[in-house]
Amino acid sequence: MPAGAKAALAIATGYVVLGRDLLPDDLPLLGGLDDLVVVALAVDLFLESAPDLVLAEKLAELDIPREAYDRDIAQIRRLTPGPLRRLIRRLPAVVDLADEAWHRSGLGPRLRTWITKEDSLA
């Protein structure tokens, strides 16, 4: 699975678990709706990024017909706003660019060295 798709799923999980929402959960109906939309978009993105062979294998393991899966995904996409879906679809590319920039910068090894030196002084 692409790292960006995994990151989107992790971010969505963190959004739901941490409770720092765009709409407070104590608002009737709307409070939980933003959590549902974030999770639905992240799962859609994750599943869309899955290689076809992996997806087919997992659907077969779970005894889910491909037609039923496609129908459910289409319904999720119809219920979520298009601009929001397009924004979320860009997230994996942004994560991949950030990861690439981090590795090119060489900050990872320097940060590890700095942390190790700090730990050895304590």
Image (spheres, rainbow, N blue to C red):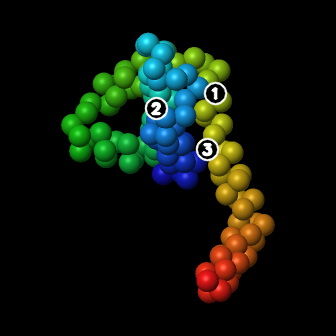
Residue depicted at 49% across the width and 40% down the height: 18
- Is residue 6 visible from the viewing direction of this image? yes
Asked whether, in this view, residue 15 is left or right of residue 121, the answer is left
Select label 1 or label 2 by which is in front.
2
Classify 112 as above or below 3: below
Q: Residue 110, located in which quarter of the rendered image?
A: bottom right
Q: Which residue is mark 3?
A: 92
Residue depicted at 23% across the width and 44% down the height: 61
Q: Which residue is mark 1?
A: 86
Q: CA distance from mark 3 to mark 1?
A: 12 Å
Residue 118: percent from left, percent from top: 66, 80
Residue 39's tag is: 2
- Amino acid type, mark 3: Pro
- Amino acid type, mark 2: Val
Residue 31's tag is: none
Label 1 vs 2, first from the N-terminus: 2
Residue depicted at 76% across the width and 66% down the height: 104
- Amino acid type, mark 1: Arg
